[in-house]
Image (spheres, helix red, strand yellow):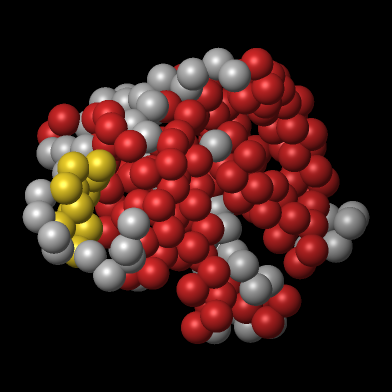
Amino acid sequence: MATNKNKKVQKGSASQLAKLTEPMAQCLAILRGIMAKAEAAPFLEPVAWKELGLLDYPHIIKHPMDLGTIHTQLENGKYVTPDAFSKDVRLVWKNATTYNRPDSEIYTTAERLRKLFDKRVAKVTKTALKRRKDGTIPVITRYDQTRFANLASALTCDELGMLVDMIQKDCPQALIDEDDNDIEIEVGNIDGASLYAYINFAESAIQRRKQVKK
């Protein structure tokens, strides 16, 4: 299929968004459990390094992250897999142990919460991996479909052409030729496994572009 055609993606209404998929809902429950602990208070918001006079903080910590930001991003559907979610949570602990001394309270607390988080999230990650290996069809939510549509809309023409070629190979029933210039992607006709693969493709393409710009 030529990639110089205009492609349109059918989008769902934000008001129709369904809940998170089961694995991500479990991740949300784990995160809220961690955040509810009194000792997690220092990790709930971005480090106020200016107010605290930690002028070297942005020079040492290149990728700040906090649990509150992760919670918002999880609810907004940024994380498609438990692995992506876990990577950011572990970044919170890594930043704390990188900046603070090993004998400090914040360091020991971060280590304690890291071990607790790893123990709780391991089961979710293991289940998700087993489902992929067993070929279990993931449950598709309206949120997943809308997430895909938004990502596809952010792709360049060449990237979108590659995506359409993937769909043509895996789910040809999802492509609707309207005329010589337009191809509509009917998200509802894409199966679960393929949809998540396309989401991962789009996220990776966008991330690569951001890294090149940097």
Quadrant in the picture for residue 11? top left
Q: Which of 47 and 146 is in front in this view?
A: 146
- Residue 198 vertical position relative to residue 18 in the rendered view, above or below: below
- Residue 125 vertical position relative to residue 54 in the rendered view, above or below: above
Looking at the rendered structure, the number of numbered marks drawn on it comes to 0
On the image, the x and y values in percent for residue 61 come to 68, 71
Quadrant in the picture for residue 128? top right
Q: Is residue 45 visible?
A: no
| Extreme residue toward the right, this view | 103
On the image, the x and y values in percent for residue 136 come to 55, 16
Residue at point 54% right, 69% down?
Answer: 208
Horizontally, is 27 left or right of 188 in the view?
Answer: right
Residue at point 59% right, 45% down?
Answer: 84
Residue at point 55% right, 80% down?
Answer: 212
Which quadrant, please, contains the C terminus?
bottom right
Horizontally, is 52 left or right of 72 in the view?
Answer: right
On the image, the x and y values in percent for residue 19 come to 32, 25
Which quadrant, please, contains the N terminus?
bottom left
Q: Nearer the viewer, residue 170 or 44?
A: 170
Quadrant in the picture for residue 111? top right
Q: Can residue 141 be seen in this view?
A: yes
Residue at point 35% right, 52% down?
Answer: 164
Q: Nearer the viewer, residue 133 or 45?
A: 133
On the image, the x and y values in percent for residue 56 come to 69, 82
